Amino acid sequence: MATIMSWGNSSGTRGRCDARCHNAKHPKCVCMCGGRFHGSANQPGGVEQTVRDYWDDVVDEAEKKAREEGLELETERWTKNRQRILGELPKLNKSKKQQQAIQYRLPLEVANVR
């Protein structure tokens, strides 16, 4: 099971939320998530669903704050990152050469300059 979050300093990792928390059966969370992911592996949907719910809550809160400030929040990149991290993006059957071409593609406004 992966570490969902960690914190540290120049001396190294000081705390993290990992399988010990996700698989916990005791009621008290002692890791850095403050209980957000505690025992989530034992819940319907498991850790993955808990991460999805958390991600959605973060985006909702950010959108609310943006509206309060009279701003518009761009969530397209957040959504794609969420899908990538949670394995929700379809796998593309591209050749290695095509994948390399995409990886090194210049931004559109630069690529179209003649």
Image (cartoon, rainbow, N blue to C red):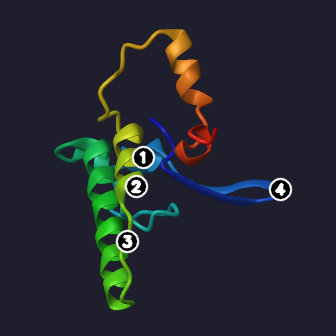
Residue for point 36% across, 88% down: 70
Q: Which is more foreground, mark 4 or mark 2?
A: 2
Residue on which the image places disc 1:
81
Mark toward the start of the polypeptide (3 vs 4): 4
Mark toward the start of the polypeptide (1 vs 3): 3
* Mark-to-mark CA distance, 1 and 3: 15 Å
Residue on which the image places disc 2:
78
Q: Do labels 4 and 2 touch, CB within 8 Å?
A: no
Residue 83 horizontal/vertical position (percent): 34, 42
Q: Which is more foreground, mark 1 or mark 3?
A: 3
Question: Badge 4: few (under 14), some or many (20 or more) residues near its Cα, within 10 Å?
Answer: few
Mark toward the start of the polypeptide (4 vs 2): 4
Secondary structure beneath label 1: helix
* Mark-to-mark CA distance, 2 and 3: 10 Å
The amino acid on which the numbered mark 4 sits, given as a three-letter code, is: Ser
Q: Do labels 2 and 3 touch, CB within 8 Å?
A: no
Which image quadrant: the N terminus?
A: top left
Position of 30 with respect to 50 (left or right) is right
Q: Do labels 2 and 1 touch, CB within 8 Å?
A: yes
* Mark-to-mark CA distance, 3 and 4: 36 Å
Residue on which the image places disc 4:
11
Mark toward the start of the polypeptide (2 vs 3): 3
Mark toward the start of the polypeptide (1 vs 4): 4
Residue 102 horizontal/vertical position (percent): 53, 27
Residue for point 33% across, 90% down: 68
Kindly indicate the quadrant of the structure image that contains residue 97. Answer: top right
| The one of 29 and 68 positioned closer to us in this rendering | 68
* Mark-to-mark CA distance, 4 and 2: 30 Å
The amino acid on which the numbered mark 2 sits, given as a three-letter code, is: Trp
